[in-house]
Image: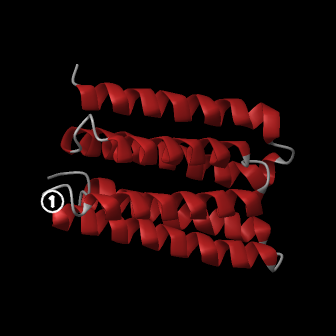
Amino acid sequence: MTYSKRRALFATALFTAAGILAWPLFVYDWHISLPLEIFYALLVVNAYPSVRLFSSIVPQEDGRHALADIILAISYLFIAASIGQPPQFALCTLVMFLIAAAKYTLMLYDIPHPHLLQRKIRADLLGALMCAGILALMNLGWVYYAAWGMTLIFTVASVYVLAVKPLYKI
């Protein structure tokens, strides 16, 4: 098994375990948290091809990218831990998308795939923008509908980047 595949499997297993453990530990109202759990599951599904691809093109000994990966992984754990609190979930997800955009921006000068990186950065910034809008709606009191809207938008985006116009291919 290749390094990138092992790394993708480890990340996916870690994030999956966090999502499963978060449900009984942090969910107080499953009606509100169900769309967030679905969103998180889709996030984990998207993480596998992303980690697999980018681990294959980033030098293993590059400490900056390893540090960015650790920070990004911690942000996933914060997202899982906030599954019972929709505004915090949207905020943690917003921060995760911004961290990811920064990480891939750093790669622009190190990796010879600028088109791929620019598409990934745009996707992450659009995710951050979506989360900011969802957070605003939640703060206006539309928590339930905003949570489902977040999940529906991300579902459509996931189908697009995974199947319609695959993002995780060189």
Which quadrant is home to the N terminus? top left
Q: Which quadrant holds residue 167?
A: bottom left
Residue on which disc 1 sits: 113
- Label count reads 1
Q: Which quadrant holds residue 25?
A: top right
Give residue 120's position: percent from left, percent from top.
Answer: 32, 63
Give residue 10's position: percent from left, percent from top.
Answer: 43, 27
Q: Secondary structure at mark 1?
A: loop
Is 122 situated above or below 5?
below
Q: Residue at x 49, y 49 (%)?
A: 43
Is 104 situated above or below 61?
below
Q: Which quadrant holds residue 66?
A: top left
In this view, the residue in front, 156 or 100, is: 100
Is 70 situated above or below 121?
above
Q: Residue at x 60, y 66 (%)?
A: 150
From the viewer's perspective, is 95 left or right of 167?
A: right
Query: Which amino acid type is marked by label 1?
Result: His
Give residue 123's position: percent from left, percent from top.
Answer: 38, 67
From the viewer's perspective, is 128 left or right of 36?
A: left
Q: Badge 1: few (under 14), some or many (20 or more) residues near its Cα, within 10 Å? A: few
Give residue 127's position: percent from left, percent from top.
Answer: 49, 67
Q: Residue at x 24, y 57 (%)?
A: 166
